[in-house]
Amino acid sequence: MAGIHRRRIVTTIATAVAIFGASVAASGQQAPLSADAATLAEIDRVMENYRLDEHIPGMVWGVVQDGRLVHAKGAGVQDVQAKRPVTSETLFRIASMTKSFTALSILKLRDEGKLSLDAPADTYVPELRGWKYPTEDSPKIRVRDLLTHTAGFVTDDPWGDRQTPLPEDEFTRLLSRGVPFTRTPAMAMEYSNLGYALLGRIVANVSRQPYKDYVQRTLLDPLGMTSTGYDVAAAPAERRALGYRWQDDAWKLEPTMAHGAFGAMGGLQTSAADYAKYVAFLLSAWPSRDGADTGPVRRSSVRELSQGANFASVRSRPGSSGPEACRGASTYGMGMYAVTDCELGLTLNHGGGYPGYGSHVLILPEYGVGIFALANRTYAGPRAPVWDAAVVLLRAGYLKTRSAAIAPALATAYAAVRTIFTSGSVTSAGDVLAMNFLMDRDAEHWARDLSALKAQVGACDTASAIVPSGALSGDFTWRCAHGRVAGRLLLAPTTTPRIQALSFDRATH
């Protein structure tokens, strides 16, 4: 189903995808992942086991790191009869992984001042103006509600998948008649393909061009995704992964659905080589920074994909590590689920399930890594092996957080902290304390507590850098003669930032 997500991929690709904004080079060699061969072999084993266990004819998977497709592999066949092997250029339909393309199209139009996310959706789709809402106090559906699946529509997997080829005039008639609600808008998140089909109609009405053409010109062409599109029949037949259903212990060919009014929710077709360019573009939005913003959608707007509607849930991590891993806080952002994982940090992910296809993508912005897999069996979304691949990289020590720059004010304050600790006096570093600091604990008590701590740990090496958690805060750890000191520094939001809070504790683990 276009929103169903599940779980586990043999041809090495020869295309290195350069970071967004640079040229894409067919180098003849795969860019090296900063991981050893055994780690990559473990990822391949996880993926291939899933393909075999789930009766998937063909599957391809890839790892994007620092803007490049650095590891990819295909397994099985794209066509059961012809037995053509899956490669990085094989074309798969990615189902609901299409939704982030639709969300970015809406955000692009917002950035251009052509629509508002908080405007009623009927501002841009006149057919909605006569709708009967479930209660007299129902708010009108906003564009934002459609993006975050909070419009009050019922979950429509699998019905929505089969609506992909619905002609635009029939969709207009459907909207004109109105649809039933399952709840009042803006009350809860419930996944809706209809909602994203409506977003496709908004893109078309506001841009005054067909939805698929807008996505092509705004995202696909600028990113060099020359093999990606919605017109499946126009793609070379010899490159297409045909979609199959596993039924009666055999693969049965699914009918190919043409592009139509529901294409915005799940109709895109792409290859691993092409999709890697999109993943690299998404990752390039992190971290926030100065400098040219040359993408087809600005970086700050891409980061909005992680902003949900505050209807959060708690979810177990997919994959084999799930039962032991801490549960993550999850919300639906815009075309992506945003989950905070205690080990992987901020994650963006989405699956795709479709008649004949299944897919999953996992974005790890704090590490600059993305992992995805595409398959050609109905609703065989490889969610579990994609997350397992991330855990393989994590356990092997190959997920490295990007180091954040230390702001000048924080660096100045941290130098003062070293002086304070060495001298044993909070007043020894000069005018560095905010007005509240000595009101919260006076200099005498600070001196007593610092003396007691130093007696326990002995002489400390204070040379280690502070690890910023923002421009005005950070954490540090010092090694001492008899243990370690863990500290935290917090500056006040004043024109000249001064220390509003400071802590020193003996580290226990």
Image: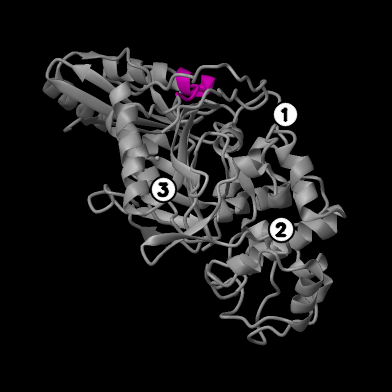
| Quadrant in the picture for the C terminus | top left
> Which amino acid lies under the numbered mark 1 shown in the image of this protein?
Thr
- Report the magenta residues as a range: 403-412
Which badge, 2 or 3, comes first in the chain's sequence?
A: 2
Disc nearest the viewer among 1 and 3? 1
Task: Please tell me whether mark 3 sits on a helix, a strand or a loop.
Answer: strand
Tell me if 146 is positioned left or right of 393 in this view: right
Q: Residues within 10 Å of mark 3 (few under 14, many from 20)?
A: some
Q: Which mark is residue 277?
A: none
Q: Which residue is mark 3?
A: 340
The chosen color scheme is one colour
User: Which callout, 1 or 3, points at the residue further toward the start of the chain?
Assistant: 1
| Residue found 21% across the figure and 30% down from its top | 449
Q: Measured along the vertical axis of the image, is residue 489 above or below residue 129?
A: above
**Mark 2 surroundings within 10 Å by alpha-carbon count, few (fewer than 14), some (14 through 19), many (20 or more):** many
Q: Amino acid at mark 2?
A: His
Residue at 35% x, 35% y: name it: 44
Q: Residue farthest to the right?
A: 208
Amino acid at the residue labelled 3: Thr
Which residue occupies 68% across, 81% down? 179
Q: Residue 203's x, y, as percent?
A: 77, 56
Compare residues 202 and 449 and report the one nearer the observer.
202
Instruction: Give the residue pinned by disc 2.
Output: 259
- Secondary structure at badge 2 equals loop
Place of residue 199 in the rendered image (x, y in percent of width and height, measured from the top left): 71, 61
Q: CA distance from mark 2 to mark 1?
A: 30 Å
Q: Mark 1 = which residue?
A: 294
